[in-house]
Image (cartoon, rainbow, N blue to C red):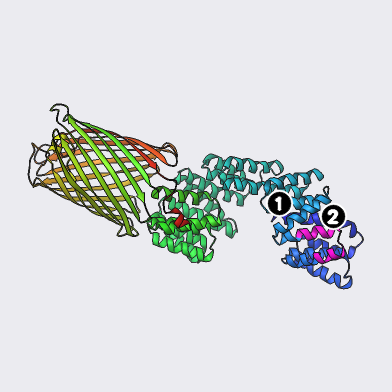
Amino acid sequence: MYYRKICLCLFYFMAFSVVAQNSMEAGFRFLEKGSFEKAEAFFDDYLQSDPDNKTALICYGRAVGLSGNPQKATDLFAGLLETYPKDFEVQINYNESFLWDKKYEDAKPLYKELVARYPDNFGAVLGYANTLSNLKEYKRALEWVEKALTLQPGNESAKVSKKYMHLGYANTFVNNQEYARGKELLKKVFVDFPEDRDALLNLANVYLITKEVDSAKATYKRFATSPKDSITALNGIALAEHIGESEKEALRVAKQAKKNVRDLEDLELTERTYDRYVQALIWNRKFGEARRQIDSLAGAHPNRNWVLALKATLGMYTGDFKTSLTSYDTILVNDSTSFDGNLGKANALFASDRTVAAYQAAFKTLEIYENQKDALSFIEKLNVLHTPIIEEQAAYTFDNGDNVAFSTNTTVAVPLSAKFRTTVSYQYRNTENTVTLNKANSHVFLAGFQYKPFPNTQLKTIVGLNNSRFMTEAYTQPVFDTKLALKPYKLQNLELGYQREVQSFNADLIEREIVMNHYGLNYNLGTNFNLGWYTQLMHTQQTDSNTRNLLFTSLYYNLFRKPALKMGVNYQYISFAQQVPTIYFSPEQYQAYELFADFRGAFSEKTNFWASAATGLQQVEEDPQTTIFRAEAGLKHQFGKRLSGNLYGKYSNIASATAAGFEFTELGLKIKWLLAKRPLFYEKIEK
């Protein structure tokens, strides 16, 4: 509380009345040193023998107020004002007692009246400046503190007040995401206090928020002027390295800080340092060591929020969201205003597929931390996922069988609640063989819904009609697609489905009106050691009496997270009951073995890219093995909060529904537009 730092300067203007009162010097020294309880006892005793001494009464009132009983001080000064109604000393102490009691609104008009009567009094002007600052009226507070400094140039108490005004004013701009103005105000502190610790730490924090990693690290290095401050700086640099996605360097720095803090006897700094070290272990996916450290810390510091937060973070990284929620709930029992507890719980609820509860936890965070950037970003992320959208896809394809095609797909999705959304779509495909001149087109109209009866359980159903035309002939077939998606255990995804579709790859297949009924199962198993396994099983029954069985399995390893690089091996097996090679590719047995790589990253915050490629061998029945290659790449750009688009291209020579030796290329464009700023159900949740 910076107004306490000026209390003595406001007090010593009374010196004229105490010069000869050497018997009170001991009490003055208690006030000067901040020993307010001793000062209270001293002046209480003094007043027993001289109960009407104004100076002693004022000193007693100050001691009472500053030792934790501001209301008693206010009452005492109010009584003195009745005796000395125009006395400046009594009035200014009366005003200041409201500051001690944090009744800044009450103090404001009192100081305003005082500075009107005494515009050249330093104590009154500075008191008014501090009152405005406590009311977060920083612009006017700075104007008044400059007036105080004009009255007493270089006054240390006024400069200290000015510093804290700059810090508070900068914080308001940072909270409103006006970071440039915030940094400008923080740098002004250095005019009066070069390399001020508070300003440096606040400035470094802004650089972290804006992801100016190099500037953050440089600022922390400026802060490192003592053994303790050096460790604080290392902890900050470790976080900066994490934000800059240099996880190994973050762990190296955190280890150095942990080593250095052992030489100091500072419990709070030691806790912060071990906190950062365990975080760095988690960032580097060293989950076993992180868990051992957390267990050890929990034994030494039971039920401490920072240890519980580490346990919750580990749960979030390892997919153990139930443990994370339990830990965040315990944090909130200990401290209902905890930022880590409130926003952490919001993230854990979202990861647990409890959207409404996640929204509510984020709203509660904003009630406590107004305009907090991370909470606002979290809500924005939820909004994007649940806002009505329209998506348009256009593609041009060609193959070595002289087939060319143009297709479009328009989809509108409208989430009516966090659990239920409806979709409608229209698909058009025009295909032609440039040699035979056979032409065909298809129109597919679909309507469907997605419903989540329980968290991590989703039912998706789509029904519609496929109208296909080949030259002068036409037919219409119903189509149907339903899937049940589950997460039976952590890091596992299971999908069961049935789909009825009409073969529409090229004109010849459209002509034959082949309807396929697919019965499928998809299963993905993740791990906390970067290994994953994906499997697809599908049985297809066709209206031409043929059946197909398909197995696709992929074992992959995540080499890097940012940018993401995944590599692995694929195996595919296909078998048809009947072989009709003159109509479509239908071997009795087909096998393919591939090595693949998938690479995803970002050029900037708004532009992402992805690329994948696979190569290997394929074999059709007893034929010799042939080389296969397929690749896909794309570029996505976020033009604004509501509009995004991406370009993509893909190539494959893997055997398909048409033939072996087949080569296929597709070029496409996708546009996605959010139809509203917020979900339709947003206001109901916000209430």
Q: Residue at x 9, y 46 (%)?
A: 546
Left/right of residue 576 with respect to residue 376 in the rendered view:
left
Locate residue 44: give its quadrant.
bottom right
Residue 248, given in percent of the width and then of the height, sits at: 44, 46
Q: CA distance from mark 2 to mark 1?
A: 22 Å
Q: Residue at x 75, y 68 (%)?
A: 72
Above or below, 107 against 650 in this view is below
Circle on res. 621: none
Image quarter in which the N terminus is found: bottom right
Does the magenta stretch mainly form a helix, a strand or a loop? helix
Left/right of residue 454 with respect to residue 577 in the rendered view:
right
Residue 256: within the magenta? no
Residue placed furthest toward the bottom? 48
Amino acid type indicated by mark 1:
Leu
Between 597 and 126, the one nearer to me in the picture = 126
Between 217 and 661, the one nearer to me in the picture = 661
Residue 290 seen = no
Locate residue 637: give its quadrant.
top left
Q: Mark 2 against mark 1, which lies toward the viewer?
A: 1
- Magenta range: 77-96
Dot 2 surroundings within 10 Å: few (below 14), some, or many (20 or more)? few
Amino acid type indicated by mark 2:
Phe
Task: Say whether marks 2 and 1 touch (CB < 8 Å).
Answer: no
Between 465 and 76, the one nearer to me in the picture = 465
Residue 313, given in percent of the width and then of the height, sits at: 44, 56
Circle on res. 13: 2
Look at mark 1 in the image and give the residue it sits on. Answer: 132
Left/right of residue 69 with respect to residue 259 in the rendered view:
right
For marks 2 and 1 on the same chain, the one whose residue lies earlier in the sequence? 2
